[in-house]
Image (cartoon, rainbow, N blue to C red):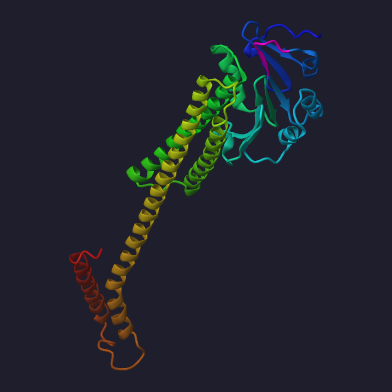
Amino acid sequence: MMQPTGNIEAGHIHLDSSFVIIFSRSKGMRRLALEQLRNYELAEDEFYWAYLQRIAAQNREFLEEVGLEHSDIDDLLDREVRPHCHVRSKGAFIAINVFNELPKQESGDMDCAQIWVDSKRLICIWHDPLDVFQNLVRGFQSHVPPSSTAEFWARLVLAIADRAEEMMEALQDRIDHLEDVVLETGDHPWESELAQVRRLATIIRRSMLVHLDILRNFEIENFDWVDRINKRRVREAGDRALRIAEEMDAIRERAEIVHDQIMYKRSENINRYMLMMAAIAVVFLPLTFITGLLGINVGGIPGSHDPVAFTVVTGLLVFFGLILFAIVRWFKIF
């Protein structure tokens, strides 16, 4: 029988290639190449985590060798799969959306992790490296490695919830800033930023509701290899997903309020400018009428031959304009 490599530390696990990690309560963590697993017999207290790169040519052969059914293999290797939980008699196939850091997800794109989990193995198919697995591995350094696939799965869904909460806090900070800008300073932020916050909140909310549905479907199955503690952890991850979805609703409502405030201020400014134009028209329209009347090219215009008539008429128009301006101010039109 081919022997595995020696124990490894979590810091030596690099998520840039396919590998298998054997977890044992007594022996710790050991790393294997995919071909080494063929002749390795798991002890009673051992399980393994297979981390497979999607583009690897040997994936189907490996999955057939570990004993998965063809339908489950097809689901794992399918490039176009919707998030869901498909329960089998001995395990479950799970396709779940995973976010990376918020700055990397401005377009709202998500990665989908396709996972098979049963009592002795947890198999993940990935296309691009996922930060949530890196955080999970870092957690192995500060905590005891998982003792079962159920605990590994529970830690994974909690790590996904942690990442979603980080994104939620980032969106809350952004909407707080937009509210301060609009409500306190009166400035108009870029509407594209507000629209981006609303779009990301919608995407995260939809993803968390699907996430919640997946966890509930998994939770209601009475797998004998999922103990009470890890059921409670999965339920906690579901509760956090529901809370995040509710927070995303609140962020969208706050974004709507900010948008309404922007529209109100914009409408108020337009009304103020229109009122200003109306006040100007009230002052200058009579003056324009008088000057137009005096400028008609017919005989009989008073003072047409008087050298001081222009000065007198100009003075009268200025005086009349001041009176009209005073009337406008008296009625608080402007």
**Residue found 21% across the figure and 72% down from its top:** 319
What span is colored magenta in the figure?
42-48
**Residue found 43% across the figure and 36% down from its top:** 172
Q: Position of residue 231 (x, y in %)?
A: 52, 24
Q: Where is residue 84 in the image (x, y as percent from the top left)?
A: 62, 38
Q: Quadrant of the C terminus?
A: bottom left
**Residue found 79% across the figure and 24% down from its top:** 62
Q: Does the magenta stretch include residue 74?
A: no
> 176 or 50, which is in the foreground?
50
**Residue found 80% across the figure and 14% down from its top:** 39
> 262 or 273, which is in the foreground?
262
Q: Is residue 44 magenta?
A: yes
Q: Position of residue 32 (x, y in %)?
A: 74, 14
> Where is residue 223, by image quadrant?
top right
Q: Where is residue 295 in the image (x, y as percent from the top left)?
A: 34, 84
Q: Quadrant of the N terminus?
A: top right
> Where is residue 250, by image quadrant?
top left
Q: Is residue 239 above or below residue 19?
A: below
> 146 or 256, which is in the foreground?
146
Q: Does residue 18 appear left or right of residue 297 in this picture? A: right
> Where is residue 251, by image quadrant?
top left
